[in-house]
Amino acid sequence: MRRIFSVVAMLIAAEVGGAPQNVLVQYSFDDTLTDTGPDTFAVFQNAKGHVRLVSNIRYSGYRSIELHDVAGDGNFPELQGYFPERKKGELFFHFAMLVANPDQTLNIALAGPSHFTMSKDGIAFWLKTTNGVLHHVSDSIPKRLFRVDPFAWYLVDVRYNISDGVYDLTIHREGSPEPIVALKDQPDATNTPASSVDKFSFVGSVYEDDSEVTYYVDDVIIGTDEKVILKPFVAPGRRKLFIDRWREAKTLMLESPGCPAVLSVADFGLAQTPRDIETVPVVKEWRSACQRMERKEFETLEKKYPNAPIFALSELKALEGDAAVQRWRELEGVLHNDVRFGMIGAIIGTRESDEQNPELHYFSLLWKGEYTRAAGFAEKMDWPEQVGDALFLSGSPSQARPYYEAALRRAPDAYWPTTKLADVFFALGDTENEKLYRQKMYGRLISDGARSAFGCFPR
């Protein structure tokens, strides 16, 4: 049985407030507390396949959408988005995609009021993979584009002339300034002029139910002016490396000297974004408590709202000295998947003048930007992964590499050393080894809850 969810509840991250009128849709899936207006996405999934926000693989920002299909389960996961119907003029469609296993089937389409049918006002633009090759369907005929590489970002740009029923298709592979596809005036999927559009879809296998595809989507933009997609149209892609995420998280924490920065409505235990977040009781009580920063008040609110992690994080920020250290260790099993937890550990560590708390001392050295000292301390403690982190943050990916490799020799299936090695190879321009380690990571993607705060601290 398929289930439908509002993306306001699950997925909408960043519909740009006050965006120009020629921007119909703009999402980077980075989950804010901003009111996003009417429901503009729907998610269809069953118990086996899924559509979800992830942070480990994305083109920009903090998150992307992961779609995972399961063969033979009688259904398929789908991310379906909506915008005001366009019956004439031009429409510009941009998105980034990365496929983990291109030999599996996926489908991406623009369609109109007749839904995803091969008829007027039905499918206008259609991409699909077959045996690892990407095709576009033009005049009802699948036409070969190129063989898709695993774990490579592709930036897709479509200029659809609705009135004439033709489109231009341009695709860039990350890192390459020249397009690998540059087609002009292609008949739309059904070769039907004036076929209107009002929705798009990202799915796995629609008809055969034989796909095990996992792929990622980011930076979806739809507009009526080419300027809205011009920048990503010409810019090569890049990874969001863990060192970038560390620096971004540090900036957020520096901007929040009292209570920690809020990253999503899930911080308050909420399942959906309310119309006015500031009127929700849990939010009002948190803001009030942040004015006083008293531990007991946060403890009371933790018990009242057990599914709201923001109170435990705020409690940590309110503590000092031994009490802060003790509570940080007590909460590690609960909050180790939260990037702010490690950051708070760094702040606590900066208050300690000795090395009685080695993890916190190491974090504090990173926080202060003393990467050489951090690397030396981690080497003395025999923490190879942490040596690598400090060296990578210092701008020396080549020096970080052997330490990550040493960490993997100790734990061959470890998630973070594998991920960081992929980042290192990307930074070094070694795309083949980067792909190798990304593929090693794929298939062992574990929940954040299985990673320790120390083992993944600079994320």
Image (cartoon, rainbow, N blue to C red):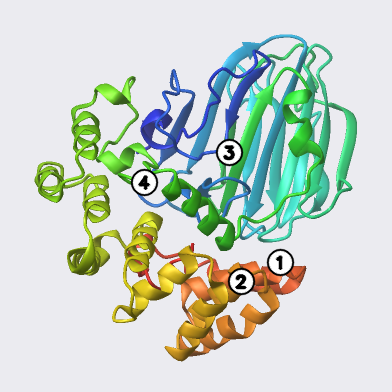
- Picture layout, residue 425 above or below residue 5: below
- Marks 1,2: beta carbons within 8 A: yes
Decide if residue 432 is on the left or right side of residue 64.
right
- Spatial distance from mark 4 to mark 3, Cα to Cα? 41 Å
For numbered disc 1, what is the local secondary structure? helix
Q: Which residue is mark 4?
A: 257
80 left or right of 60 in image: left
The amino acid sitting under disc 1 is Ala
> Which residue is at a point 74% across and 38% down the rendered structure image?
232
Residue of label 1: 427
Residue beneath the point at 46% across and 53% down:
72
Pointer 2 local density, CA inside 10 Å: few below 14, some 14–19, many at least 20 = many
Question: Measured from the top left, where is residue 327 in percent x and y?
Answer: 19, 64
Q: Earlier in the sequence, mark 4 or mark 3?
A: 3
Counting from the top left corner in percent of width and height, residue 436 is at 66, 73
Q: Is residue 418 visible?
A: no
Residue at disc 3, secondary structure: strand
Closer to the eye: label 4 or 3? 4
Q: Which residue is mark 2?
A: 392
- Depth check, mark 2 against mark 3: the one in front is 2
> In the picture shown, does residue 344 fall above or below 451?
above
Q: Earlier in the sequence, mark 3 or mark 1?
A: 3
Q: Which residue is mark 3?
A: 202
Residue 332, located in which quarter of the rendered image? Answer: bottom left
Q: Residues within 10 Å of mark 3 (few under 14, many from 20)?
A: many
Query: If you read the primary sequence from the N terminus, does the residue marked by circle 2 or circle 3 appear first?
Result: 3
Q: Amino acid at mark 4?
A: Pro
